């Protein structure tokens, strides 16, 4: 009986020793597996980082090409000794194109580099749009300038928005324009002029509520100084 008990005890001790001997082997295998997985993860991360860096370089190259191909607005030739602000508007805009809407009796000049687009509703409300070909770096789209006859209901509709803010009035060539910032898909800067029961709206976008000036401010002033109703 004692011999049997001794045999069982020896067997249990042998099994425990074998189990202890197997633990380091299992731990070593786990360490190797984790090391392999970590190495694979680092390789994948490095590959994506490399691809991302190449993509950023390609996009920057495309952006630089676009900026290089933009056509700047030609600088008018000033008379010697005169500051730009003192040069007659006829001199500043002598090489500009003229927009004439004989149906709605609207006329003004605009830079020759701008791309003119007549809207589908142009026949009824005098709408015309112009791609300035000048990039707004913040929004990554070109500035767009438009003009259309405004009805009083339309004006009352958008001017009462909470997001609409009247900033000031500006007199250009003896004409007073009320200026509004309007938040729609983009913020826009709006110039409203009223004369003899007519109302016309000039709009520049994109704009930002805190933006105090744009590269187009002087150009817009020069356009508005040439504007007139022809009837």
Image (cartoon, rainbow, N blue to C red):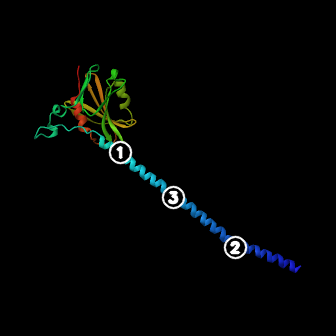
Does residue 91 appear left or right of residue 177 in this picture? left
Label 1 Cα neighbours within 10 Å, binned few <14 / some 14-19 / many ≥20: few
Residue 3 in sight: yes
Q: Quadrant of the C terminus?
A: top left
Q: Picture coordinates of residue 194 (x, y %)? A: 27, 26
Give the residue number, with chain letter if any, for mark 3: 43
Q: Picture coordinates of residue 73 (x, y %)? A: 24, 37
Does residue 212 appear left or right of residue 29 in this picture? left
Q: Which is more N-terminal, label 1 or label 3?
A: 3
Label 2 Cα neighbours within 10 Å, binned few <14 / some 14-19 / many ≥20: few
Give the residue number, with chain letter if any, for mark 1: 63
Q: Residue at x 54, y 59 (%)?
A: 40
- In the foreground, 56 or 102: 56
* Tag shown at residue 149: none
Q: Farthest residue in the right direction?
A: 1
Label 3 Cα neighbours within 10 Å, binned few <14 / some 14-19 / many ≥20: few
Q: Residue at x 65, y 71 (%)?
A: 24
- In the foreground, 166 or 31: 31
Q: Picture coordinates of residue 27 (x, y %)? A: 64, 68
Q: Which is more N-terminal, label 3 or label 2?
A: 2
Give the residue number, with chain letter if any, for mark 2: 21
Instruction: For marks 3 and 1, give the CA distance.
Output: 30 Å
Q: Which is more N-terminal, label 2 or label 1?
A: 2
Q: Residue at x 60, y 63 (%)?
A: 33
Q: Farthest residue in the bottom direction?
A: 2
Q: Quadrant of residue 164?
A: top left
User: Circle 3 sits in a helix, a strand or a loop, which is it?
Assistant: helix
Q: Residue at x 80, y 75 (%)?
A: 11
């Amino acid at each position: 009986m004692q011999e049997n008990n001794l045999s069982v005890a020896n067997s249990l001790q042998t099994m425990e020793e074998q189990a202890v001997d197997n633990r380091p082997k299992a731990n070593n295998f786990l360490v190797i597996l984790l090391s392999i997985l970590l190495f694979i993860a680092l390789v994948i991360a490095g590959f994506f980082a490399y691809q991302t860096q190449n993509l950023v370089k390609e996009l920057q190259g495309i952006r630089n090409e676009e900026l290089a191909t933009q056509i700047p607005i030609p600088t008018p030739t000033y008379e010697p000794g005169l500051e730009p602000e003192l040069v007659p508007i006829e001199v500043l805009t002598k090489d500009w194109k003229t927009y004439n809407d004989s149906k709605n009796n609207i006329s003004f000049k605009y830079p020759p580099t701008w791309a003119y687009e007549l809207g589908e509703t142009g026949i009824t409300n005098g709408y015309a749009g112009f791609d300035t070909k000048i990039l707004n770096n913040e929004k990554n789209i070109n500035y767009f300038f438009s003009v259309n006859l405004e009805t009083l209901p339309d004006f009352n509709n958008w001017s009462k928005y909470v997001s609409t803010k009247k900033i000031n009035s500006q007199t250009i060539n003896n004409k007073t324009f009320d200026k509004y910032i309007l938040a729609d898909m983009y913020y826009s800067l709006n110039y409203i002029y009223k004369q003899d029961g007519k109302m016309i709206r000039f709009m520049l976008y994109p704009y930002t509520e805190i933006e105090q000036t744009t590269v187009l401010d002087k150009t817009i002033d020069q356009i508005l100084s040439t504007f007139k109703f022809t009837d």
